[in-house]
Amino acid sequence: MEIKPDIVHDATGTYCPIPITELAKVMKKAEKGQIVELLADDEGAIQDVPAWCQTTGNEYLGYKEEDGVYHFYIRKV
């Protein structure tokens, strides 16, 4: 199944905690039900993004890796 994001945010080239702080800013602007795709190349984000979603109550839809870039998918609830 292909996930179609409403918002794509590129946080590549940044390291913890920047991808998460960037995600938090984007999620504040997103509307309920929208899907955000976060691009990051920091391996720490693999654990950080799902943990952030669990803490904030947003829905973590998963991630895929392409050429060293992680594509995380989060639905705003």
Image (tube, helix red, strand yellow):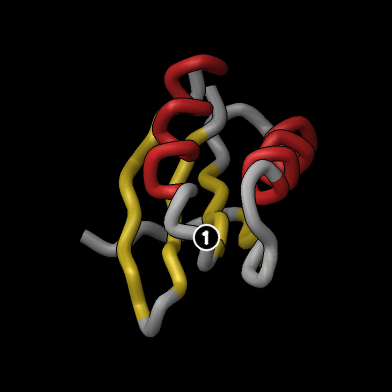
Q: Hey, which residue is sitting farthest bottom in the picture?
A: 67
The quarter of the picture where the N terminus appears is: bottom left
Amino acid type at image mark 1: Asp
Q: Is mark 1 on a helix, strand or loop?
A: loop
In the rendered view, would you say 1 is above or below 20? below
Q: Mark 1 points at which residue?
A: 42
Task: Name the foreground residue: 14 vs 6.
Answer: 14
Where is residue 38? Give x, y as percent: 56, 56
Left or right of 1? Residue 6 is right
Query: Residue sitting at 29 percent across and 63 percent down?
Result: 2
Where is residue 20? Give x, y as percent: 64, 41
In the rendered view, would you say 41 is above or below 74? below
Left or right of 19? Residue 51 is left
Q: Hey, which residue is sitting farthest left in the picture?
A: 1
Query: Residue sitting at 63 percent across and 69 percent down?
Result: 12
Where is residue 44? Give x, y as percent: 46, 49
Where is residue 46? Give x, y as percent: 39, 48
Q: Number of numbered discs present? A: 1
Query: Residue sitting at 41 percent across and 77 percent down?
Result: 68
In the rendered view, would you say 41 is above or below 61? below
In the rendered view, would you say 75 is above or below 22? above
Q: Residues within 10 Å of mark 1 (few under 14, many from 20)?
A: many
Task: Name the foreground residue: 53 vs 34.
Answer: 53
Query: Residue sitting at 44 percent across and 27 percent down?
Result: 51
